[in-house]
Image (cartoon, rainbow, N blue to C red):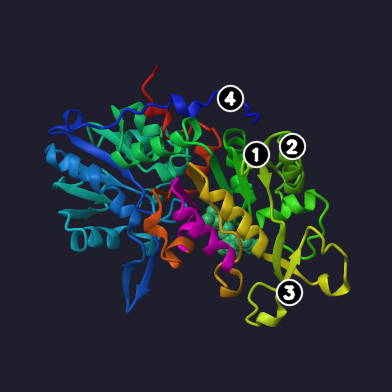
Amino acid sequence: MLRQKRDYDAAMQRLRTVTKKDVAGKRVLVRVDFNVPLEKSGGVVQVRDDRRLRAALPTIKLLQEAGAKIILISHLGRPKGAIVPELSLEPIAQYLKKKLNLPVTFSTNYDEPKLDTIVLLENLRFYEGETTNDAGFAKKLAGLADVYVNEAFSNSHRNHASMVGVTKYLPSFAGVALTEESNMLASLTTEPKRPFVVVLGGAKISDKVGALTNLANIADLVLIGGAIANNFLSAEGFEIYRSFVEEASKKDAGDYVAVARRLIDEHKTEKVLKDNYIPLPKLLYPIDVVAAPNLDTTDADELKTIDLSHDMADKPEKTKLQYLDIGPKTKHLYSELLAGAGTIFWNGPMGVWENPLFSAGTQAIARAITTSRATTVLGGGDTIAAAHHFHAEHKFSYISAAGGAALKFLGGEVLPGLKPLIIPS
Ligand code: ADP
Ligand code: MG
């Protein structure tokens, strides 16, 4: 099998990870990502998913053990430089205190906050200088502490003052979870146990083109599903009727069907041998699909399974259809290929799993991945939600909750927030 060799920047990214020695007795500014989903129930704001809060615990514990004074900073939502009371971080401080038993106080004072063991400052994005990476704002943040720690991998694709600007003025280190996430994603691209199978689905191809392009060079096999597959089917000349395809924005070059065409062409000579003798293309898209007139139908009689290998005739009754899940043959083929994998990266549901009529593909793939012997990495907000729904979440080797930042990283970009943390080689 041919495989393109390619230097990969992420491989060189050895990060300066914080140790107790770096922070002993010091004031430490820790950039976390506490941008968690909140909901109001009975007049009280509740944290719906505390994963990102828990992710910061190992770093906080290390700093506590080193006797550091901890200043936590984060954004929440998009207040765009204005004070928006609903986007206050105060409920998060309450949660850290009551649910995670941390001695946290909350402060809106960016000039001279009272430094208890741990203080959480108000939403960074109440200040315009945060998102514009304003030097004055970065200096103000740096003035609060002796050392800076980035524990916000999921925000590291943003060139913001608390991610980038501040590192010009303070000794800067990588947090424990950020280092782990970076190492895990880098290992996918540098030394995956083979065969390395990438499963890509979902709807937002615009976010995923970079990762897809780069991983298609590295992986042994790419299995495509979800609405993204519609671009590939269309590129190959299949009629997709009213199926969803994301429209390219003006700044993108060409449309996503053209992107799919280019990827198919680029990899067309690379073959994978299934069962050691059946040659398959490296990039696979569905051979059958489950279709219906709309995605919230509750009527199973409206569903049609279309076998794309021979059920090609355009019939009037097909013109109203959208492809909403991978079909049984595709499910079977993908599952067999996943069973033999050494490493699997999965991002994007195989269909509209939120509707039980179109969830079979995603559920089958979740099962095939978690019952394989591979090292398995799961990413993508909706994909994690789907895995949770199918009670499969805890069966993955690693869950990357970093969304867009992880995709950019896997696309081979050096993230601006990580760059200042790299040990020069
Ligand atoms: P993630 O958040 O995991 O990266 P995306 O945001 O790209 O995933 O896409 C998730 C959404 O894609 C799901 O909510 C699902 O309903 C939708 N989706 C999957 N397959 C299809 C399809 N064939 N047609 C329309 N929408 C789809
Ligand atoms: Mg999503």
The residue carrying mark 1 is 272
Name the mark nearer the viewer: 1 or 4.
1
Q: Secondary structure at mark 1?
A: strand
The residue furthest top is 425
Q: Residue 27: x and y, percent?
A: 19, 36
Evaluate if marks 4 and 2 touch, with contact meaning CB atoms under 8 Å apart: no
| Residue toward you, 410 or 338 | 338
Q: CA distance from mark 2 to mark 3?
A: 33 Å
The residue carrying mark 3 is 293
Name the quadrant where ligand 1 sits. bottom right
Residue at 51% of width from left, 56% of height from top?
Answer: 368
The residue carrying mark 2 is 268
Magenta residues span 359-385
Residue at 42% of width from left, 63% of height from top?
Answer: 388
Residue 96, placed above or below residue 28: below
Q: Residue 164: x and y, percent?
A: 41, 33
Q: Amino acid at mark 3?
A: Pro
Q: Residue 345: x and y, percent?
A: 50, 46
Among numbered discs 2 and 3, the one appearing first in the sequence = 2
